[in-house]
Image: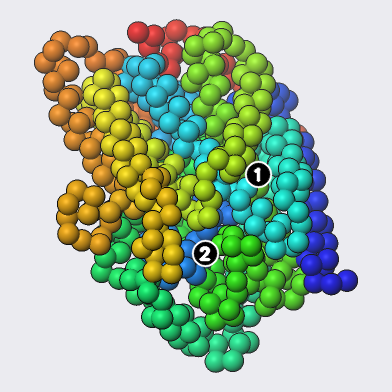
Amino acid sequence: MDDQAVQLTVFVLIFGVVAVMGFSAARWRRPNDIHSLEEWGLGGRAFGNWVTFFLLSGDVYTAYTFVAVPTLVYGLGAAGFFPVPFLVIVYPMLFVVLARFWSVCHVHGFVTPAEFVRARFGSRELGTIVAVLGIVATMPYIALQLIGIEAVFEVMGLPKGWPLTVAFLVLAVYTFSSGLRGPALVSIVKDALVLWSVLSVVMIVSMMPGGWEPVFRLAQEKFTATPRVDDGLLLAPQSQLNYVTLALGSAVALFLYPHTLTGVLASRNRGTLRRNLAVLPIYTLTLGILMLVGFAAIYSNTQAIGGNSNTVVPQWFSQNAPAWTAGMVFAAIGVGAMVPAAIMSIAAANLFTRDIYREYIRPGASAKEETYVSKTVSLTVKFGALLVILLLNTQFAIDLQLIGGVVIMQTLPAVALGLYTNWFHRWALATGIGSGLLVGMVMLYQVPKFGGADGRTVVREHFGGSAWPLETIGINSDASIYVGIVALAVNLIVTFLTTPLFRSLGIPDGRDGTREHDYVADEGDPTVRRMTEILDGDPVRDPAPSTSFFTPVTPRPDHRDDPSRSAYPRL
C-alpha cells in the first residue's frame, strides 16, 4: 500500500469508531425520557469533572487549532500566535463570569443565553436579537470546522464533493440521534488523538538535523527575504495594535459564543465548572506546539496543494510522519472538527427553538415538540454552514471565525454585563447592539483583501478580513485595528449614553425576572433544578439504606407552566 492508502485506511478506521461512538451515545446512561432540550441539548445538565473537561476542550480547541492558526504562522510568523495570549486572557474571565451564568440558568431552567437576557431585562424582543446574532455568528464557525476536514481529504487525494458530504451526513445523523451526549463521548477520543499529534510534532522536529534551531533560523530567513513588512519571527510595529486588539476581542467573543455556553450549562455544578476552567489553560500548551508546525513547514519547504493554504499543515504531516501516524493526525483533525461542529449546531438549534419557535410560532409547544424542532434545525444549520463555504473566500479560514466574532461581541452588554447589573435600559441595549453592528459591518466592508508577493496588492476591495487599516480615516500609518473592538466600544458608549435618555423620556424598563440569590445558587440549593442522572464523578448515595446505588430523584416539574415560577415576565 502507498502512503495515501495507509493514511486513508487509518483515517477511515478511526472515523468509523468515532461514528459508532457518536450513535451509541444516544444509549449512554440514557434517561427515562430524552425528549427534552435539557436532555438532548444539555446532556441532562449532569456532566461531572472528566466529561466536562473533555467536552469543553473539544468545544474550545477545534480544527481551528490544526488548520487555520498554523497556516497563519506559516504565512506571517509571529502575528499568527494571537490565540495564545487570548486564551491566557479568557480563562480568568470565564472563571469569574460563567459560574454566575451557570447558577441563574439552572435556577430558571434556561437553555440559551437569550432566555437569560429576556428574563433579566424583561424584553422578548431583546432576547430574540441575542438569539439571532448567536445563530448568525455560529454559522461561519461551523463552516471553519468543515473546511478543516476538506483540507485533509485533499491531502489524502480524495476528490472534492462526496467525501465531505459523507462526513457531513455522519455528523448530522449522530447529532440528531444523540444530542450533546454524542460530542461529549467522542471528545474523549479527540483529546487522545490531539495528544498523539502534539507528541508527533515534538518527535519529528527533534529528529531533524539540529532540532528546532534551524527551523527558526530558516523561518527568519524566509520572512526577511520577502518584500512583506508585516511578517517575521517578531511582531512588526505596524502589526502590534491589531495583534493586541485581536487577542482581546477574540477572548471576549469566545465566552459569548452559544456553543461555549452550552458546554458550560451541561456541567453538574459550579465546582465542576470552576475546576475545569482552572485546568484547561494547560491545554493551551498543546496549541502553542501545534502552531509551531507553521515554522516547521517552512523548514521542510512544504507547499500548499492547488494553492489552498489550508492544506499546508496536513501536507507537512504527510511528508514528514510515517503514513500511519499521518493518518492518526488526519483523524484528529477530522474528529476535532466533528466535536465542535456538533456542539455548535446544537447550540444554534436550541436558540431557534427556545427563543424564536416557542416565543413566536408555538408558545405552547411541548418538551417533545421542542426537541424535535431543535433536532431538525441542527440539520438545517449544518447545511447553512456548507453554503458559507461555497459563498465566502476561505483561503484563510480564520477570517470566517473573526467576522463571526465581530457579530457575537455585540451581545456582551446584555449577556456578560447583565450577569452583574440590570441598570441598562432594554431599548438602550438594543440601540447599542444596532450601532455596534452598523459600525462593524461598515468597517468590514472597508477592509480590502491584500495579496501578491509584497502583501500590498489589493485582490478584493471589500470584506477582506477583520483588520481595519487606520489609513482609512486619514491616519498616516500602516497599522490596523480589529474591527470587533471598535464596534464593541461604540456599542458600549451608545448603551451607557442612551440608558438615562430613555428613562428621562418616560419609557419604562422591563421587569427583572431574576433574583440576586439566583446568581450564586449551586447544586443542593432547593431552587436549582436537580437532574435525573450523573454521568460521571462521585455518585450521590442514598441518605438511608437502600438497594439502589444512586439516590432516587423525583423529576422536578417544568416551572414554565407555573405562573408563580415564571422564568420571565410577559410584557
Residue 484: x and y in percent read 33, 45
Q: Compare residues 139 and 564 and report the one nearer the observer.
A: 139
Q: Is residue 535 left or right of residue 401?
A: right
Q: Residue at x 28, y 21 (%)?
A: 426
Q: Residue at x 69, y 49 (%)?
A: 186
Give the answer, above or below, for where 456 lies relative to 178. below
Q: Residue at x 35, y 17 (%)?
A: 123
Q: Is residue 297 left or right of residue 153?
A: left
Whole-angstrom CA distance, mark 2 to mark 1, is: 26 Å
Q: Three-letter amino acid code at disc 2?
A: Thr
What residue sits right under mark 1 in the picture? 183
Mark 2 / mark 1, whichever is N-terminal:
2
| Marks 2 & 1, CB-CB < 8 Å contact | no
Residue 103 is drawn in which quadrant? top left
Residue 244: x and y in percent read 30, 59
Residue 44: x and y in percent read 61, 32
Query: Quarter of the image containing the C terminus?
Result: top left
Q: What mark, if any, has residue 71 been given in the picture? A: 2
Q: Is residue 419 visible?
A: no
Query: Quarter of the image containing the N terminus?
Result: bottom right
Give the answer, above or below, for where 432 lies relative to 298. above
Determine crowd level at label 2: few under 14, some 14-19, many 20+ residues with C-alpha closer than 10 A.
Answer: many
Residue 463 is drawn in which quadrant? top left
Give the answer, above or below, for where 58 lies relative to 344. below
Q: Is residue 547 visible?
A: yes
Q: Secondary structure at mark 1?
A: helix
